[in-house]
Image (cartoon, coloured by chain):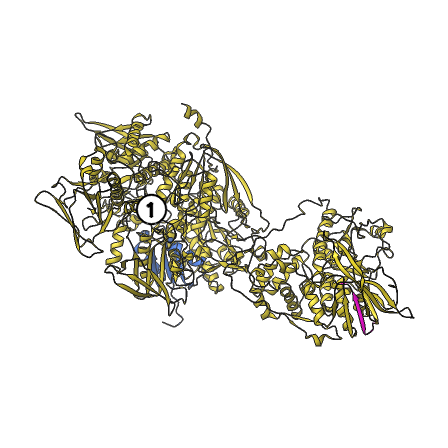
Chain colours: A yellow, B blue
């Protein structure tokens, strides 16, 4: 066969996209059936929406309790490769051989190292809305999605680098120090600043802050005062008097580095080289260090002591600063080399001025700006006159002007070439000049100086500058020589630019660039002389301090690389991109102004002008930060993480995986009602979505499960639920479909809210149709009404008005037509399930078609297949549905995905190789105790060494130790060695919870050769140090108690051995309807043998009369093909007219007898590993509404058959009436039969289309066209089908007239009056009954509910399993369902069965119950007690508990009156040893 | 009974629910008195009257079963 050939090279691996409950179930099924699973999740942990829920309906189980074991199982499975924070980027190839490209976003936390201790989150200063809690509270940027999340690891939430940090030339973590200021951690903030910049105080005063230009606050109001904030940090430190000296973490090195020039570039290079361990000598020509910071920036802007303090820090770090040393004369490159310097950094600055080059410039009284500032700064006497003219328009010119003023000049005029707006000086400097009464004159270029007789300057003539720049923007001034203007003054200071002094530099062969600076590589700063580097103003021209800092850092890096022989260029050119957050709705916050010296008070002194911020001002300002990057990169987490797991440099990673099939389970997003003002959701805190309300109710939610409303944390007394928000609504939101789950979850929430409420809570649900169509849902609904007093109001609320006291007034029309206004404390919007952008994108990437509602398009007859072969779907992506349906479909998708991969099953899966087990049974207990510090989670509270030493003296303890992290890989390896070295035969770990870590430690001791049961844990973290943090002494005592208890039990524990049983790789399928047929084919296609037993003489069941699926697919061709396939399949043997009359055995090894009827009864013995029960159901046979008494009263089945046969009655009818809920939702049969509404609506459409003039009426109680079936309901109404609702109290009356004319009378709920219809046809929407199979069910010991439907192992997560292992179900025997749902459940049963059949052998035993035959009195208590029906009275005359079936719960043990049963690993002796130990003070040596 | 009396309490907790709730209390850093000691059982159905009485006999002031 060609297909057989093709299958040989398929890949035995499946990719599952989506880590919600559907994805988890699909992955577990596949991984347990011999396939390697690649599980892809976009978030940082799996669990999906189910993990967010509080309780699940209809059992009110805690959602987390139910899902949590599955999370652990999926997270730890050897054959599931979990990719979190990952998306699918590309798919290539075809079914059987896909190549998928995955893009993994960085988590910034190493999964292999993270122990989930949470220290990172504790120190993280960034608070962001906790999306898991639906933004009802905040979490940190370092976060774990939720406490039970898997992988059990933290992640760091980043949007990208913040714009401020990206823009800062030194790339200081600006958002980081601002966040730390917000947190009051000023020391840490300063330290963070100093990681990237040695001059917080200097730059806090003089920086030109390009960062503020990019600050996102610009787009809201004004940028943050970033500069002032780090100045505050430096000022705060100075006030404290304790200066932070960066630690030299690197080892001291022998190499010496020379730095020429002690300006910001030179000092910064020294700072970073010192940190690397080098010796650094700085040579400075001037008498004092600081370069331009010292002699270029006036003191009123940068006080001397501030600069001196920051230079002193660098000196304390070890820098040797030699002042008054001139490079070129006192020292040369040659002398440096001779003195042993390994590298030299030239940062000599631009200390020369530039001449105008006009006549008489050398006259007395003409000064150079740079020199003037230097002389002033160095305290030299500079003589200036009363009238000073400054030539130049840059920052230096302004400093010159203001300094001249302070030096006593009466009038200072600044004259420049540029127009006011072209001036190169920064705006704030110009403003300061104006404040300082400097006259600024624009657009003049100097022509010549006027001199007096003594060659002293007396003025200057200017010519008008008509343009400074040419059309290309180049500096090319044009003058009008005819428009001149003289200015008179006694001192003229030329301040038009700077130059460097190259005396003694060029002589040494140091290269000079064309503009006259030092020549060096722009990236590495290396000069043509390899050991000489150049930077700062002398290299790139005049720039600011922060640019020099940036350059100095690069120089240090280059020099370090040069000395170590590393590549100088590799990875140097980093791109600094940033993303800005959305600022819509951001409230305005005014920038905090900086207090300054009054302009008058500045005269004739050099007092600092700006006061900077005080603490309060700094905090107010810091609070304006918009946290653009989310994570602020403050790196507090890096220091806090003792496991070294945090890595902020992680990059996105692309991975290519090869898989045979793909399952898409990306889930949904709860509908967002915020865009509709009508719901008052966006603006009123007490209008919540149902998802938010789940979190409110959750014990791990924002209010710890206390029922409160957000506005004032008051307990509400009256809550309203509004149904169909974002569902069944084409007017507001275009979601025409029904979300299928909201009616039930609202009902559940009312009950749970009442349970949580201390007062008598009034709950009202406003709805259109109550759609409680699932198994046991109708009962739940009835209980809500009858027992809990929940008000269900059939009405659409049309107005929600906020009223006094944070309450909400609801206006609606009741059923009697009265307008009612009612005030509630709180409103819950029952939001629907929406597709989202990601799912649409995923579908596009995968080439999967979507339907008109943007969910995956599937066929009813192949419910989990997409248009792309090899790609399957499940969960809400396939259509809105509840958890059990999702789980069922997940298993179905798993079997569909595996169907074509059978030949590759087991080719990629991994198995652990283990050493042989040591026999320790007869040895004296030798206990090893390992106490964990869990970083500081335990050790930071309890005295771990004391606990360890205490354990040393406990009986039988031969070894104790404590570890930083007991679960880390290195400790695990060490533990194995220790066990072997000390012949330890019982291991006790005192650490976290056995729920998460016992399997890991058990694996470790097994690898050390010990039986895995020789292990016991003491939970001294989750149940001790985390809950007794405030009482370290008591926590220590309790830790000792818990360790003592664990050791006491450990002494008594025994190795348990599991035994291997061969699996019979075949299945018995009972029932030959669609479910049975699909199951048999599924099993057989996997290459396993299937035995199909059908009671009747014909295969096909109800599908033989069913016309169409709800989407309109013809059923009969499908079922005929299916029957044909079963008949011809080489792996299927069919028994017709047959029944199972005997069965026995256990999971993997059942044996049954099938009796085939007919004339000669024959029996066949069948060996099978699993059983699938698909015994089906049938239509209810009505006794009401004249059924059977009048020929024109038809059931649904009759109608289908009539339609298929082209019955003339249908064509002839003028009027047809459907009556819903016949045999459903009544006292006798409380359940909803789920499928009848859709069937009626669909049939009505067919009739109406055939004969549009016919009057078609549907008399109903609630129309339950769930999911996309709602489209049919809408279409029926559009076609003119008339829907009339009736109450159960007043059902329609059907009578027969004299001429046999049918008459239906029903009370119309709108008119409030009875109306009479005389239909020609009356169709009864007959419910579903399970087929009677009492004997069979008893034979297999499978439970049924009151209505006779089979009861699954768990209503939510095991919808196709029975409590008894190895038996599964599908189809109508489980509950009424449509054909697509039946097919899905049958495929699901195949998947569940495959987890058994794919194994050649299974391991049984372990923690199981065992009967002592001598003590057994055959009282049958255990037989009756066991919830799994495992114990039997064996042929020997005593109870037998099969290890293969035993779940280890121990119920039988506690109940057995003769104490004949023991639960291994939890024996009475072991449990009592714990309590005895608790109260026995250990006698210590 | 003096005002400083602190009862010693033994709690038998089902590993699937109550024990997990105990862990959750830890994750949430809720505080409760340290004189409660939890003994994990595979199911509260395993708890025998014997375990309860024996604990009291050994010195427990109270015993509770949660699951």
Magenta highlight range: A384-392
On the image, which quarter does residue A422 sit in? bottom right
Residue A219 percent coordinates (x, y): 57, 60
Which sits in the foreground, B66 or A1469? B66
Question: In this image, A1318 relative to A546: left or right?
Answer: left
Q: Tally the numbered discs.
A: 1
* Residue for point 32% across, 45% down: A1271
Judge the density around disc 1: few (<14), some (14-19), many (≥20) Cα neighbours within 10 Å.
Answer: some
Question: In this image, A420 relative to A189: left or right?
Answer: right
Question: In this image, A54 relative to A559: left or right?
Answer: left
What residue is pinned by disc 1? Answer: A1267
Element at badge 1? Answer: helix
Q: Residue furthest front?
A: A482
Residue A1334 percent coordinates (x, y): 20, 40
Which sits in the foreground, B45 or A657? A657
In magenta stretch: residue A407: no
Q: Residue furthest bottom?
A: A600
On the image, which quarter does residue A237 sit in? bottom right
Residue A200 percent coordinates (x, y): 67, 63
Q: Chain of mark 1?
A: A
Q: Residue furthest top?
A: A1
Specify the quadrant that holds the N terminus of chain A.
top left
Query: Residue A265, relative to residue A972: is it above or below?
Result: below
In magenta stretch: residue A385: yes
């Amino acid at each position: 066969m060609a297909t057989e050939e093709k299958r040989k090279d398929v890949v035995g691996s499946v990719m599952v996209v989506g880590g919600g409950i559907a994805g988890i179930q699909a992955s577990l099924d596949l991984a347990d059936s011999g396939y390697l699973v690649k599980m892809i999740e976009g978030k940082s942990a799996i669990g999906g929406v189910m993990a967010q829920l509080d309780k699940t309906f209809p059992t009110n189980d805690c959602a987390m309790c139910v899902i949590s074991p599955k999370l652990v199982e999926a997270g730890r499975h050897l054959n599931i490769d979990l990719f979190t924070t990952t998306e699918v980027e590309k798919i290539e190839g075809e079914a059987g051989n896909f190549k998928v490209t995955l893009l993994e976003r960085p988590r910034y936390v190493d999964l292999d190292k993270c122990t989930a201790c949470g220290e990172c989150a504790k120190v993280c200063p960034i608070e962001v809305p906790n999306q898991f809690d639906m933004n009802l509270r905040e979490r940190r940027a370092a976060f774990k999605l939720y406490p039970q999340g898997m992988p059990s690891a933290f992640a760091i939430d980043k949007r990208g680098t913040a714009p401020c940090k990206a823009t800062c030339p030194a790339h200081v973590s600006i958002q980081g120090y601002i966040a730390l200021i917000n947190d009051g951690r000023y020391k840490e903030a300063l330290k963070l600043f100093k990681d990237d910049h040695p001059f917080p105080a200097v730059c806090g005063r003089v920086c030109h802050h390009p960062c503020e230009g990019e600050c996102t606050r610009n787009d809201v109001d004004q940028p943050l005062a970033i500069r002032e904030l780090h100045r505050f940090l430096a000022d705060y430190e100075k006030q404290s008097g304790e200066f932070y000296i960066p630690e030299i973490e690197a080892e001291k090195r022998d190499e010496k580095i020379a730095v020429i020039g002690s300006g910001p570039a030179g000092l910064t290079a020294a700072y970073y080289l010192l940190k690397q361990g080098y010796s650094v000598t700085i040579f400075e020509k001037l008498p004092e260090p600081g370069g331009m910071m010292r002699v270029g920036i006036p003191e009123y802007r940068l006080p001397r002591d501030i600069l001196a303090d920051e230079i002193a820090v660098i000196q304390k770090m070890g820098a040797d600063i030699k002042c008054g040393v001139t490079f070129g004369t006192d020292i040369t490159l040659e002398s440096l080399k001779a003195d042993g310097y390994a590298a030299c950094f030239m940062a000599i600055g631009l200390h020369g001025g530039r001449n105008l080059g006009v006549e008489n410039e050398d006259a007395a009284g003409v000064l150079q700006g740079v020199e003037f500032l230097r002389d002033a700064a160095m305290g030299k006497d500079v003589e200036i006159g009363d009238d000073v003219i400054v030539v130049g328009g840059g920052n230096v010119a302004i400093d010159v002007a203001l300094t001249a003023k302070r030096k006593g000049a009466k009038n200072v005029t600044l004259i420049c070439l540029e127009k006011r707006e072209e001036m190169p000086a920064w705006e704030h400097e110009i403003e300061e000049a104006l404040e300082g009464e400097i006259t600024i004159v624009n657009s003049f270029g100097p022509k010549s100086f006027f001199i007096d007789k003594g060659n002293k300057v007396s003025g200057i003539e200017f010519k008008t500058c008509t343009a400074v720049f040419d059309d290309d923007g180049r500096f090319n001034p044009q003058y009008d020589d005819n428009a001149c203007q003289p200015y008179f003054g006694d001192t003229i200071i030329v301040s038009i630019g700077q130059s460097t002094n190259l005396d003694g530099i060029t002589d040494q062969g140091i290269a000079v660039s064309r503009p006259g600076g030092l020549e060096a590589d722009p990236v590495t700063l290396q000069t043509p002389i390899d050991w000489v580097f150049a930077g700062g103003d002398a290299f790139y021209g005049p720039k600011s301090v922060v640019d020099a800092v940036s350059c100095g850092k690069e120089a240090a890096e280059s020099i370090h690389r040069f000395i170590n022989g590393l590549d100088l260029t590799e990875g140097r050119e980093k791109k600094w991109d940033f993303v800005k957050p959305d600022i819509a709705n951001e409230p305005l916050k005014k920038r905090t102004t900086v207090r300054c010296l009054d302009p008058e008070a500045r005269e004739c002194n050099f007092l600092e002008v700006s006061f900077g911020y005080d603490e309060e001002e700094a905090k107010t300002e810091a609070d304006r930060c918009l946290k653009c990057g989310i994570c602020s990169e403050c790196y507090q987490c890096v220091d806090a993480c003792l496991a070294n797991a945090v890595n902020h440099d992680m990059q996105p990673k692309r991975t290519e995986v090869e898989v045979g099939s793909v399952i898409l389970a990306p889930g949904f997003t709860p509908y967002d009602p915020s865009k509709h003002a009508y719901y008052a959701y966006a603006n009123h805190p007490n209008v919540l979505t149902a998802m938010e309300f789940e979190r409110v109710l959750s014990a791990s939610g924002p209010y710890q499960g206390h029922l409160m409303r957000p506005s004032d944390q008051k307990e509400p007394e009256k809550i309203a639920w509004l149904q169909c928000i974002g569902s069944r609504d084409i007017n507001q939101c275009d979601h025409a479909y029904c979300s299928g789950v909201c009616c039930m979850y609202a009902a559940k929430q009312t009950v749970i809210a009442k349970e949580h409420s201390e007062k008598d809570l009034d709950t009202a649900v406003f709805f259109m149709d109550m759609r409680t169509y699932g198994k046991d849902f109708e009962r739940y609904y009835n209980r809500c009404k009858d027992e809990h007093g929940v008000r269900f109001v059939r009405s659409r609320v049309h107005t929600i008005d906020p009223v006094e006291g944070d309450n909400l007034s609801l206006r609606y029309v009741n059923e009697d037509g009265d307008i009612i206004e009612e005030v509630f404390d709180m409103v819950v919007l029952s939001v629907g399930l929406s597709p989202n952008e990601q799912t649409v994108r995923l579908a596009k990437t995968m080439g999967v078609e979507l339907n008109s509602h943007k969910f995956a398009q599937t066929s009813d007859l192949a419910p989990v297949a997409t248009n792309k072969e090899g790609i399957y779907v499940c969960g809400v992506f396939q259509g809105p549905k509840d958890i059990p349906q999702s789980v069922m479909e997940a298993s179905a998708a798993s079997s569909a995905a595996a169907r074509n991969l059978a030949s590759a099953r087991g080719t990629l899966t991994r198995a652990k190789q283990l050493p042989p087990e040591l026999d320790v049974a007869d040895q004296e207990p030798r206990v090893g105790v390992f106490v964990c510090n869990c970083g500081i989670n335990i050790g930071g509270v309890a005295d771990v060494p004391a606990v360890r030493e205490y354990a040393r003296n406990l009986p039988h303890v031969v070894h104790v130790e404590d570890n930083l992290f007991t679960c880390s890989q290195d400790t695990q390896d060490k533990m194995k060695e220790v066990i072997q070295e000390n012949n330890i035969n019982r291991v006790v770990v005192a650490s976290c919870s056995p729920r998460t870590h016992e399997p890991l430690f058990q694996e470790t001791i097994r690898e050390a050769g010990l039986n895995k049961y020789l292990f016991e844990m003491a939970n001294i973290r989750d149940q001790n140090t985390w809950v007794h943090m405030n009482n370290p002494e008591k926590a220590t005592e309790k830790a000792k108690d818990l360790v003592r208890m664990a050791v006491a039990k450990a002494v008594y524990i025994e190795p348990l051995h599991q035994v291997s049983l061969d699996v019979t790789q075949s299945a018995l399928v009972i029932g030959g309807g669609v479910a049975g047929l699909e199951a048999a084919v599924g099993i057989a296609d996997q290459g396993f043998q299937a035995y199909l037993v059908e009671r009747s003489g014909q295969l096909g069941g109800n599908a033989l009369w069913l016309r169409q699926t709800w989407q309109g697919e013809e059923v009969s061709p499908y079922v005929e093909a299916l029957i044909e396939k079963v008949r011809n399949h080489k792996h299927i043997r069919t028994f017709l007219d047959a029944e199972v009359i005997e069965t026995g055995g256990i999971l993997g090894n059942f044996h049954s007898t099938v009796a085939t009827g007919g004339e000669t009864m024959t029996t066949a013995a069948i060996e099978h590993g699993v059983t699938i029960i698909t015994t089906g159901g049938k239509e209810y046979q009505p006794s009401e509404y004249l059924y059977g008494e009048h020929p024109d009263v038809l059931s649904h089945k009759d109608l289908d058959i009539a339609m298929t046969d082209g019955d003339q009655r249908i064509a002839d009818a003028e009027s047809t009436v459907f009556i819903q809920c016949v045999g459903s939702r009544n006292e006798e049969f409380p359940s909803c039969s789920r499928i009848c509404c859709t069937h009626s609506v669909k049939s009505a459409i067919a009739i109406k289309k055939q004969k549009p003039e016919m009057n078609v009426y549907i008399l109903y109680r609630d129309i339950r066209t769930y999911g996309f079936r709602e489209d049919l309901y809408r279409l029926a109404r559009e076609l003119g089908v008339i829907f009339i609702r009736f109450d159960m109290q007043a059902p329609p009356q059907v009578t027969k007239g004299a001429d046999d004319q049918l008459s239906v009378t029903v009370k119309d709920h709108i008119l409030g009056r009875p109306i009479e219809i005389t239909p020609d046809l009356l169709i009864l929407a007959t419910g579903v009954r399970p087929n009677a199979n009492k004997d069979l069910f008893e034979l297999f010991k499978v439970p049924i509910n009151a209505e006779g439907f089979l009861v699954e192992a768990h209503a939510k997560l095991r919808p196709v399993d029975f409590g008894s292992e190895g038996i599964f179900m599908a189809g109508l025997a489980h509950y009424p369902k449509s054909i697509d749902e039946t097919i899905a459940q049958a495929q699901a049963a195949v998947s569940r069965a495959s987890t058994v059949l794919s194994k050649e052998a299974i391991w049984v035993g372990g923690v199981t119950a065992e009967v002592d035959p001598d003590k057994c009195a055959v009282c049958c208590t255990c037989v009756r007690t066991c919830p799994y029906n495992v114990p039997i009275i064996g042929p020997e005359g005593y109870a037998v508990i099969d290890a293969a079936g035993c779940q280890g719960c121990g119920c039988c043990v506690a109940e057995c009156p003769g104490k004949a049963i023991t639960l291994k690993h939890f024996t009475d002796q072991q449990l009592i040893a714990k309590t005895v130990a608790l109260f026995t003070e250990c006698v210590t040596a | 009974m003096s005002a400083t009396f602190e009862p010693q309490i033994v709690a038998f907790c089902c590993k699937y629910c109550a024990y997990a709730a105990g862990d959750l209390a830890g994750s949430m850093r809720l505080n409760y008195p340290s004189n409660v000691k939890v003994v994990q059982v595979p199911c509260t159905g395993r708890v025998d009257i014997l375990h309860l009485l024996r604990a009291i006999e050994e010195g427990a002031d109270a015993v509770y079963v949660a699951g």
